[in-house]
């Protein structure tokens, strides 16, 4: 399975996800083909808490910013950009180590320019697990920011609003962050919907990486997101067949044997709707009808 490129400590690293054998989609995975093969329907863009036009990523390695400590969300800390991919940043809290790096979208409300905390009457805090004595934090902070490149205000983006409700349906396809390997974004399916939460199941991985999240999670994206942002979408796994998310009916009402019907299917590939004219033949074939 192809790996994603990331930067860590100023060096280029290539990650790969564990796999039993090469995926049949390796090197040539396309959503359009995959959706046809699985008789699947992509989740519409309005289901997601994502910008309709993905935000530009103008950050650079080593830039400093303020970020919520993901392990202590009441604290705002200094963070350094140590990786870039698509519209996401890999961040490391200053005073922490590389075992606690985390990813944020460039339009996340959890990242802000240096000075935002003070402007709003707050104080920058050392990260959970600060490696030095707490009393040394003020001097450490001063040295950290002295001469550092601060991320300019103009490259931060406003966080998009949440959808008004949970519009997801079981079987819809999407792209999702693998939370066990968060540098990866992979093809996924809505496995179950329960109130404000959805079960994210990763195609071809037999539940090994599944997780529940809120419908407005920033870790899930419409089909086509990675192609728009330039992120590296991993192909489906090899530990199980793709899960069809539609009912295949052997025949279309009103058509005789050997007849053909032309159906228009609107696919939300990223945020561009593509009309696909599909001919459904009745002779020994099956018509793929979406299960909504």
Image (cartoon, helix red, strand yellow):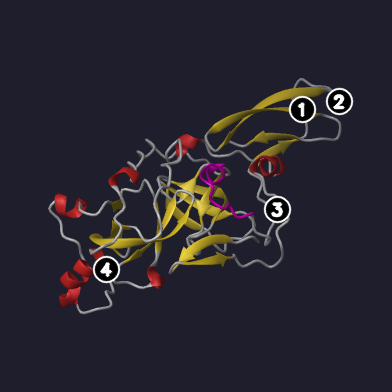
Residue that carries the numbered disc 4 in the rendered image:
127
Q: Magenta stretch: dominant SS?
A: loop
Q: Residue at x 77, y 27 (%)?
A: 279
Q: Residue at x 62, y 37 (%)?
A: 291
Circle nearer the N terminus (1, 2) = 2
Query: Image check: 151 left or right of 121?
Result: right
Residue that carries the numbered disc 1 in the rendered image:
279
- Dot 3, crowdedness within 10 Å: few (<14), some or many (≥20)? some
- Tag 2, which secondary structure? loop
Q: Residue at x 66, y 45 (%)?
A: 30
Q: Confirm or deny contact between disc 4 and disc 3 (CB under 8 A).
A: no
The percent coordinates of residue 52 (x first, y second) are 45, 35
The percent coordinates of residue 186 (x first, y second) are 57, 53
Circle nearer the N terminus (1, 3) = 3
Q: Which region shows up in magenta?
A: 223-235
The label on residue 25 is 3
Q: Confirm or deny contact between disc 4 and disc 2 (CB under 8 A).
A: no
Q: CA distance from mark 1 to mark 4?
A: 58 Å
Q: Nearer the viewer, mark 1 or mark 3?
A: 3
Residue extending farthest to the front is 147
Circle nearer the N terminus (4, 2) = 4
The percent coordinates of residue 76 (x first, y second) are 24, 59
The percent coordinates of residue 222 (x first, y second) are 52, 42
Q: Confirm or deny contact between disc 1 and disc 4 (CB under 8 A).
A: no
| Residue 191 appearing in the image | no
Q: Nearer the viewer, mark 4 or mark 2?
A: 4
Please tell me in which quadrant of the rendered image residue 78 appears.
Answer: bottom left
Residue that carries the numbered disc 2 in the rendered image:
257
């Amino acid at each position: 399975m192809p790996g994603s490129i990331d930067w860590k400590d100023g060096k280029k690293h290539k990650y790969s996800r564990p796999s039993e054998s090469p995926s049949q989609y390796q090197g040539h995975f396309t959503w359009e083909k995959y959706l046809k093969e699985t008789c699947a329907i992509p989740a519409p863009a309005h289901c997601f808490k994502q910008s309709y036009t993905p935000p530009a990523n103008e950050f650079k390695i080593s830039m400093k910013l303020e970020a919520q400590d993901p392990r202590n969300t009441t604290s705002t800390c200094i963070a350094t950009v140590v990786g870039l991919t698509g519209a996401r940043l890999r961040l490391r809290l200053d005073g922490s180590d590389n075992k606690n790096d985390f990813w944020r979208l460039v339009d996340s409300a959890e990242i802000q320019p240096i000075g935002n905390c003070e402007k709003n009457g707050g104080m920058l805090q050392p990260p959970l697990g600060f490696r030095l004595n707490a009393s040394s934090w003020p001097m450490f902070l001063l040295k950290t920011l002295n001469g550092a490149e601060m991320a300019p205000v103009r490259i931060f983006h406003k966080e998009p609003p949440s959808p008004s409700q949970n519009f997801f349906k079981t079987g819809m396809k999407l792209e999702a962050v693998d939370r066990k390997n968060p540098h990866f974004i992979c093809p996924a399916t809505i496995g179950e919907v329960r109130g404000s939460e959805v079960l994210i199941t990763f195609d071809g991985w037999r539940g090994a990486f599944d997780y529940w999240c809120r419908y407005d999670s920033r870790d899930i994206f419409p089909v086509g997101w990675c192609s728009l942002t330039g992120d590296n979408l991993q192909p489906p796994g090899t530990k199980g067949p793709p899960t069809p998310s539609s009912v295949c009916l052997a025949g279309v009402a009103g058509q005789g044997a050997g007849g053909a019907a032309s159906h228009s299917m609107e696919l939300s590939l990223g945020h561009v709707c593509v009309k696909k004219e599909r001919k459904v033949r009745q002779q020994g074939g099956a018509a793929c009808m979406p299960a909504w």
